[in-house]
Image (cartoon, helix red, strand yellow):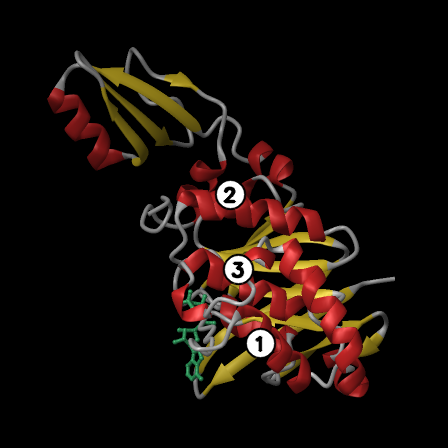
Amino acid sequence: MNKLEIKNLTKSYGRKNANNDINVTFENGVYGLLGPNGAGKTTLMKQITALIQPSKGEIIYNGENINDLDEKYRSVIGYLPQEFGVYKSFSAKKFLQYIAALKGLDKKQATKKIDELLNLVGLYEVRNKAVGKFSGGMKRRVGIAQALLNDPKILVLDEPTAGLDPQERARFRNLISQISKDKIIILSTHIISDIESIAKETIMIKNGSILMKGAHRDILLGMEGKVYSIKTSNEDEVWEIQNNYKVVNIQRGVNDVELRIISDKMPPYEQAQGVQPKFEDVYMFYFDLENTREV
Ligand SMILES: Nc1ncnc2c1ncn2[C@@H]1O[C@H](COP(=O)(O)OP(=O)(O)OP(=O)(O)O)[C@@H](O)[C@H]1O
């Protein structure tokens, strides 16, 4: 069994709640934690990794409170923090040996595991090169490898794709899918495409609370009838639509402009037609347009 239950979790800093009455259950598979900056993703991840104590509520792992499990619980956690620092002069292999020692792993077992992980993250060939010379994507892969050293049952990755180019992001998604069979993987991001194809469930957080959670199919079903496309060659209309609707996307063609909008009812334009919702529309509906696109 591998089940993590978050019950009524709240973290207060003075009068501010960094998160507020969070309830969610995780089982094996990938979960995406989606929300804008300051939504409360890191706070939730630090509570899950037992780095900070909740002000209220509890976390139950396989039926037991994680505070009672203490070290036993920490030994099943793998964590890649948002600000992941590496010793630049260390080689990838030496860095992993160092972290393995900090985690108290047996040296012989660690040596075998490190080779295995270097292969898994595609860094075996460059294992003796200084990490300082690695690209952002390669450093993140070292970060994932260190989080996997203790064969965690719960892997928590805080914005693991920040700063990665699209190719590195795709590689990262493949890696996560590959290792997700026997683990709970919780991955935070504000970039939809990171989780669209790999997360079995997405949890959308805003202002410390869960706005919506569920499988993508179900979340998308909830958006049916709310997404429209309008084609027009009239610039005044483009202006009017932008002022009156949540516009997800604008595509300028040679002779006309196509706007993708969110609306509760059919917009009163001749060329308006309902379209299949995409995850980008969901984000737009629940949050704002900022931060939705890959950069
Ligand atoms: N130690 C702290 N003291 C006071 N306020 C805090 C503390 N940690 C977090 N907060 C506040 O709690 C809220 C949630 O922060 P959190 O870092 O969890 O958000 P986030 O979704 O991870 O954002 P980001 O993507 O920017 O990291 C923010 O308003 C933040 O300012």
Q: Is residue 53 above or below residue 81?
A: below
Which comes before the other along the chain, label 1 or label 3?
A: 1
Q: Nearer the viewer, mark 3 or mark 2?
A: 3
**Amino acid type at mark 3:** Val
Residue at x 45% of width, y 21% of height: 275
Residue 150 visible somewhere in the drawing: no
Question: For the residue labelled by badge 2, is the local secondary structure a helix, a strand or a loop?
Answer: helix
- C-alpha span from label 3 to label 2: 20 Å
x then y, percent, for residue 245: 29, 34
Q: Which residue is mark 3?
A: 126
Q: Is residue 66 above or below residue 120?
A: below
Question: In the rendered image, which quarter contains the N terminus?
Answer: bottom right
Question: For the residue labelled by badge 1, is the local secondary structure a helix, a strand or a loop?
Answer: helix
Q: Nearer the viewer, mark 2 or mark 1?
A: 1
Ligand 1 - quadrant of the structure image:
bottom left
Q: Quadrant of residue 115?
A: bottom right
Question: Which disc, if any, is residue 94?
Answer: 1
Question: For the residue labelled by badge 3, is the local secondary structure a helix, a strand or a loop?
Answer: helix
Q: Which residue is mark 2?
A: 170
Q: Is residue 126 left or right of residue 258?
A: right
Residue at x 54% of width, y 69% of height: 92
Q: Is residue 148 above or below residue 294?
A: below
x then y, percent, for residue 214: 64, 47
- C-alpha span from label 2 to label 1: 27 Å
**Amino acid type at mark 1:** Lys
Q: Is residue 25 left or right of residue 238?
A: right
